[in-house]
Image (cartoon, grey):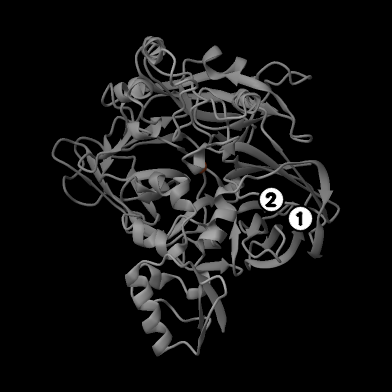
């Protein structure tokens, strides 16, 4: 039996439901001194009134206080390493550092950010050595961080928070200057991921700046502007790496940089100087550029796929309105409001040869969707297979406004009826087609998928995906299998809200999955680290930083056996740790 606290501001239908639930199934209830209703239920009882709440047992419902503590509270840094208390046995071969990045500061002085993705970057490191774990964290000393701290308020706009440093003074002249620049010089608050170019590590987001960090001390070395090396306004925080250590990434060149286009580029492995003082980007090589389908409405993209021979770019109908973007400051709206999902448009799949930079001439397309994360892509018997986490609309971004993420679960569900959970889908593109291929029939001959691709009268190919799994985000794989046929992926389970509350391992062959969860815990994106000399794809461990809304549970680094998905060790951190987004494991 479990006791779940629900906030006093329950919407009437929910309250009615709970009163009915109390009468019918609960064994009793008490009125908490803080005027909260305490419902006693069986562990496996499920809420019945709302179809989406049915997916969560009562024990998984979170109160507003808990959600605020997890998502909206300011984090703090731990600049000197602290030793974690290890329970269980960490494999002796696990030697290295897991770097993580995410938003950690949501207010400065009396000013607050509106959106969770606006928070100032907090970098974490978990170092594994000889069965022990040490932790440290530091705020990224970006120019944005320094300007905000100096002013003791937020003075640099973020994607969901537009700031007017001095709203009383000559706003029109500033707006005019802004329009002349057309595209704003974005924030350098790189809060999304840690990426490697050459042998240098950078905190990264999706704009033209990245900030180099020292992976040991977490000191900020200094920022680098993509535009000093390659014509880009935006670049993803999710590059790919090949076996030689080269890095591949994609960006967008808007206006003011020649013709607008998407750009795919490569940073060779051997580009770092001894002192790590010269930016690896100075050796950047452009692989190719792809023109926008619509000049003023480029597609937003957060990641891309890579196979042994090809790059896969999904040009989705989730688009950036350039005119709106260029005038956002003047109009007093956020940059986030300049993104729009066109549900009546199609999704286009570009397949580009990694060596020649030439695009496959066949036009592949599918129904409108939104994608943030690619899972993996590979070639198989004349086909290109591409696995994605998809959404049927763009509501996910709105879910992460601070006012939303700190709501208790039931209120969140009630006020965000439009939330559509992520669905893992497999698209298959037949590569050996020509103008004489049969029209209308399925050209996919792989036997392990129901994905279809049918040539239309005009020679284009309409693709319908195969659903692999529902309710999972922040995917990861054994990266040795990136670009190759693979069997397992891992991720964070999200169902009725975007708050991750379980980890899962998916078998794409059997379509079965395993889960790890602990009551009142929020695990971060799972990271796979392979055992040395491993032959099997899932021979290794899963690392996940876990925080809990239970004050009696310290944050901990969870170590799972990737094969069985069972816990083999946890390292409790004796200081505060904040929920993060993405990261990178650097072996010793
Ligand atoms: Fe991401």
Q: Nearer the viewer, residue 182 or 157?
A: 157
Q: Residue at x 51, y 69 (%)?
A: 60
Establish whether ligand 1 lies closer than 8 Å to the Cβ of label 2: no
Up-down relation of residue 163 to residue 372 (above or below)? above
- x and y percentages locating residue 494 in the rendered image: 47, 59
**Left or right: 47 as drawn, with respect to 487:** left
Mark 2: few/some/many CA within 10 Å (<14, 14-19, 20+): many
- Is residue 55 visible to the viewer in this orientation of the structure? yes
Residue under circle 2? 577
Which residue is situated farthest in the left direction here? 457
Q: Nearer the viewer, residue 353 or 522?
A: 522
User: Residue drawn 50% across and 83% down?
Assistant: 41
| Callout 1 crowding tier (Cα within 10 Å): few <14, some 14–19, many ≥20 | many
- Residue 553 locus on image (x, y percent): 70, 64
Q: Nearer the viewer, residue 317 or 313?
A: 317
| Tags 2 and 1 touching, CB below 8 Å | yes
Q: Is residue 48 visible?
A: no
Q: Is residue 552 above or below residue 244?
A: below
- Please report the residue visible at 43 percent of the width from the left and 60 percent of the height from the top: 471
Q: Provide residue 131's location: percent of width, then percent of height.
A: 84, 56
What x and y, as percent, mark residue 67? 53, 57
Residue found 48% across the figure and 27% down from its top:
157
Residue 573, label in figure: 1
Rounded to the nearest angstrom, the CA distance separating label 2 from label 1 is: 8 Å
Note whether 388 is above or below 447 in the view shown. Answer: above
């Amino acid at each position: 039996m479990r006791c779940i606290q629900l906030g006093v501001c329950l919407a009437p239908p929910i309250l009615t439901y709970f009163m009915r639930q109390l009468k019918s199934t609960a064994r009793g209830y008490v009125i908490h001194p803080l005027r909260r209703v305490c419902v006693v239920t069986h562990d496996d009882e499920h809420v019945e009134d709302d179809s989406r709440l049915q997916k969560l047992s009562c024990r998984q419902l979170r109160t507003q206080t808990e959600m605020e503590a997890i998502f909206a509270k300011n984090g703090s840094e731990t600049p000197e390493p602290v030793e974690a208390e290890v329970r269980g046995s960490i494999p002796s071969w696990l030697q290295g550092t897991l770097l993580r990045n995410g938003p950690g500061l949501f207010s400065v002085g009396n000013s607050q950010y509106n959106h969770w993705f606006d928070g100032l970057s907090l970098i974490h490191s978990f170092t594994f050595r000889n069965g022990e774990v040490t932790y440290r964290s530091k705020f990224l000393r970006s120019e944005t961080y320094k300007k905000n701290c100096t002013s003791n308020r937020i003075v640099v706009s973020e994607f969901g928070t537009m700031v007017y440093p001095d709203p009383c003074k000559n706003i029109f002249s500033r707006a005019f200057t802004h329009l002349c620049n057309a595209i704003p010089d974005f924030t350098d608050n790189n809060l999304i991921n840690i990426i490697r170019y050459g042998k240098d590590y950078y905190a990264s987001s999706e704009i033209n700046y990245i900030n180099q960090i020292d992976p040991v001390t977490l000191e900020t070395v200094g920022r680098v502007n993509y535009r000093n090396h390659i014509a880009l306004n935006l670049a993803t925080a999710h590059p790919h790496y090949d076996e030689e250590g080269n890095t591949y990434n994609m960006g967008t060149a808007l206006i003011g940089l020649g013709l607008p286009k998407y750009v795919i580029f490569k940073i060779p492995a051997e580009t770092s100087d001894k002192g790590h003082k010269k930016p690896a980007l100075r050796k950047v090589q452009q692989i190719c550029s792809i023109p926008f389908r619509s000049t003023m409405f480029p597609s937003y993209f957060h990641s891309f796929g890579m196979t042994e021979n090809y790059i896969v770019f999904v040009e989705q109908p989730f688009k950036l309105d350039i005119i709106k973007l260029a005038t956002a400051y003047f109009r007093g709206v956020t940059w986030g409001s300049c993104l729009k999902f066109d549900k009546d448009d199609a999704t286009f799949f570009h397949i580009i040869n990694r060596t020649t930079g030439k695009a496959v001439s066949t036009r592949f397309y599918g129904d409108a969707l939104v994608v943030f994360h690619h899972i993996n892509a590979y070639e198989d018997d004349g086909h290109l297979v591409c696995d994605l986490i998809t959404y049927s609309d763009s509501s996910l971004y709105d879910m992460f406004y601070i006012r939303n993420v700190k709501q208790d679960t039931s209120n969140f569900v009630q006020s965000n009826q439009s939330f559509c959970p992520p669905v893992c889908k497999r698209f298959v593109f037949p590569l050996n087609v020509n103008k004489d291929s049969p029209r209308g029939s399925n050209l996919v001959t792989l036997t392990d998928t129901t994905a279809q691709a049918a040539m239309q009268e005009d020679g284009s190919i309409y693709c319908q995906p195969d659903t692999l799994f529902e309710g999972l985000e922040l995917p990861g794989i054994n990266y040795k299998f990136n670009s190759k046929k693979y069997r397992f992926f891992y991720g964070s389970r999200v169902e009725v809200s975007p708050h991750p509350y379980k980890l899962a391992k998916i078998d794409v062959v059997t379509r079965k999955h395993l889960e790890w969860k602990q009551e009142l815990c929020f695990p971060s994106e799972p990271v796979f680290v392979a055992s040395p000399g491993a032959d099997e794809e899932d021979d290794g461990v899963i690392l996940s930083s876990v925080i809990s809304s239970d004050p009696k549970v310290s944050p901990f680094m969870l170590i799972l056996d990737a094969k069985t998905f069972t816990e083999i060790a946890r390292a409790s951190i004796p200081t505060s740790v904040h929920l993060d987004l993405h990261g990178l494991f650097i072996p010793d």
